[in-house]
Amino acid sequence: MPSYKRQHYLPAVYLKQFSPDGHRATRKSMVWRLDEQCHKQVPVKSQCAKDYFYSSCDAKTTEEMFQKMERVYDRIAQKIWNCEKPGEGDYFGLILMMVDIHCRNPFYVNQTGEENIEAYHRRIHCLRNEVLMGTSSEIVTDAELLKRLRERWKVRLLEPARGNELVSCDNPSIWFTIDDSSDLHLMVMPVTPYFCAVAFDTRYCYVEGDRLVREDEELLNQFQVLMADACMFTRSVVSIEEQASVRRKWKERERPLGMVDKKQWSVNLYGVGGPNSFRFLKLLSHHSSEGRDKAGLKKA
């Protein structure tokens, strides 16, 4: 196979964390995959990749760009496995990886007329200028973006109860709004079967504690089912009953409708409220509660 031909939209460095090999996992490790047809173990490196998915014209440059972030994430994940307290830079790296994985996902229909790498760059541009900075015309520098993120965003790692495991999917970084504004306020992504990263805009909400209650574990796993493109990934075998439940939810769900073209990006956001209320999430008292019960898929 030519160099850089096989391009992952969900990096192997992320998916390998859900292998039974745990912190010793590699790209060659196995992980349990559940899709509409079967449930079996598959090699990590074989998943969530397509030939020249991003670019055939500049495959080497594209892959090297993604690998920089992936190396940082691998270091952070090892710290988490080793129960080392991540530094401030590590937490910030988690936020960037949550952004990157979301923006790389093929759930967003590419209507730019260009290769997927151009659609990815368009999503990143819209995120920087419109979603995070609130401007659509000015050029936002890296320094300005980093300053804004550090001022407004934080991330926490939350653990499920001992013996319980979190699941993942081929679209694991899920974004939320807490009102009817269609603004991004919260990002959630399982990092390992035993830790979930939660990034939040401190102007509107905060995360309380470092443990997940049963209701939060169930809701997090449910969102992974709802946002999966084609499959789920788990460390352990999924029971026959749970397999049937997941496939039933896939048939009943409303699939995300996100797209990107040369002018705009419609972002897949879920509403937080009503049955979709995380127990760990606390809204700041000055923020209006109007509209928070309108939970469900939202389109900006």
Image: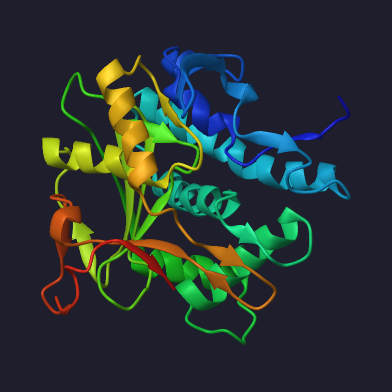
* Left or right: 48, with 243 as reference point: right
**Residue 202 image-quadrant placement:** bottom left
- The answer to whether residue 171 is above or below residue 203 is above
Closest to the observer, 232 or 31: 232
Where does residue 85 sit, x and y in percent of width and height? 33, 35
Q: Is residue 213 visible?
A: no
Q: Is residue 185 visible?
A: yes
Q: How many marks?
A: 0
* Left or right: 215, with 120 as reference point: left
Q: Residue at x 16, y 50 (%)?
A: 280
Dividing the image into 4 quarters, which one contains the N terminus?
top right
Where does residue 209 sit, x and y in percent of width and height? 14, 45
Q: Residue at x 20, y 54 (%)?
A: 276
Which colouring convention does the figure follow?
rainbow
Q: Residue at x 62, y 73 (%)?
A: 141
Q: Which residue reaches farthest bottom?
A: 137
- The answer to whether residue 59 is above or below residue 255 is above
Where does residue 298 sit, x and y in percent of width and height? 37, 67
Dividing the image into 4 quarters, which one contains the C terminus?
bottom left
* Left or right: 10, with 243 as reference point: right
Q: Residue at x 57, y 57 (%)?
A: 108
- The answer to whether residue 13 is above or below residue 227 is above
Closest to the observer, 36 or 75: 36
Where does residue 47 sit, x and y in percent of width and height? 60, 28
